[in-house]
Structure formats: structure tokens, C-alpha cells
Amino acid sequence: MSEIEFVAEVKANWTFIRRWLGAFTGTSYSLWRSPDGRFEVGIHEADNEIIGILDTTTQLMLIPARDILRILKKVVAEGVRS
């Protein structure tokens, strides 16, 4: 199942929690809760990308690898400027 297919399943079967605008992009994000309440998924609405998955029982946040790479690149770039 692709990420876009998964997001479509989430939006069809999970409970919508809230929507907000990104601080830097001004684009819309949404939060959805699984039917059993165990997971919450954040979705970037502009391109239906998953921005994070929270396991509500452990409070462990899983961030997609592409976002981890963006964060690390930013940290490295800022470290070089220091």
C-alpha cells in the first residue's frame, strides 16, 4: 500500500481530530485517530504526506525518514554557520 493509499484509508475510516495551519508554510495539516484510539496520524493536506504517527499508549512519535533527513540537514547547516 502506498502512502497516498494509506492516507485515503485513514481519511475514510479514522476519526478526524483537528486541522491547523503550518507555522512556516501556512498550509493546512490535519490530525486523525485510529478506530481503536491507539494511533494518531498527522497529514500535510497539500500533498497528503504523513508528517508523524503517534502511538498513544507509549507517547512514542514516529517521524518519516524524509523529515528526519530534513531536520538533520538543517541542524548540520546551522552547526556549520556557528
Image (cartoon, rainbow, N blue to C red):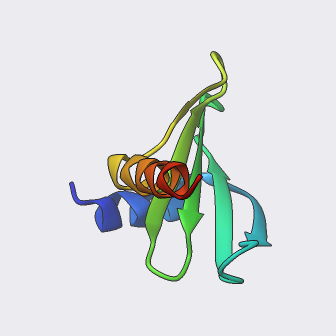
Image point (41%, 66%), residue name:
8
Front in this rendered view, residue 18 or 11:
18
Looking at the picture, how far across and down is residue 26, in whole percent?
71, 83
Q: Which quadrant holds the N terminus?
A: bottom left
Front in this rendered view, residue 26 or 56:
26
| For residue 41, above or below residue 29 | above
Image point (55%, 63%), residue name:
43
Q: Is residue 16 left or right of residue 80?
A: right
Front in this rendered view, residue 73 or 57:
73
| For residue 25, above or below residue 12 | below
Direction top: furthest residue: 58
Looking at the picture, how far across and down is residue 54, in whole percent?
59, 35
| Residue 45 position by quadrant | bottom right
Q: How many marks?
A: 0
| Residue 70 position by quadrant | bottom left
Image point (67%, 56%), residue name:
31
Direction front: furthest residue: 82
Front in this rendered view, residue 13 or 63:
63
Looking at the picture, how far across and down is residue 13, in whole percent?
52, 55
| For residue 24, above or below residue 73 | below
Looking at the picture, how far across and down is residue 58, in whole percent?
63, 16
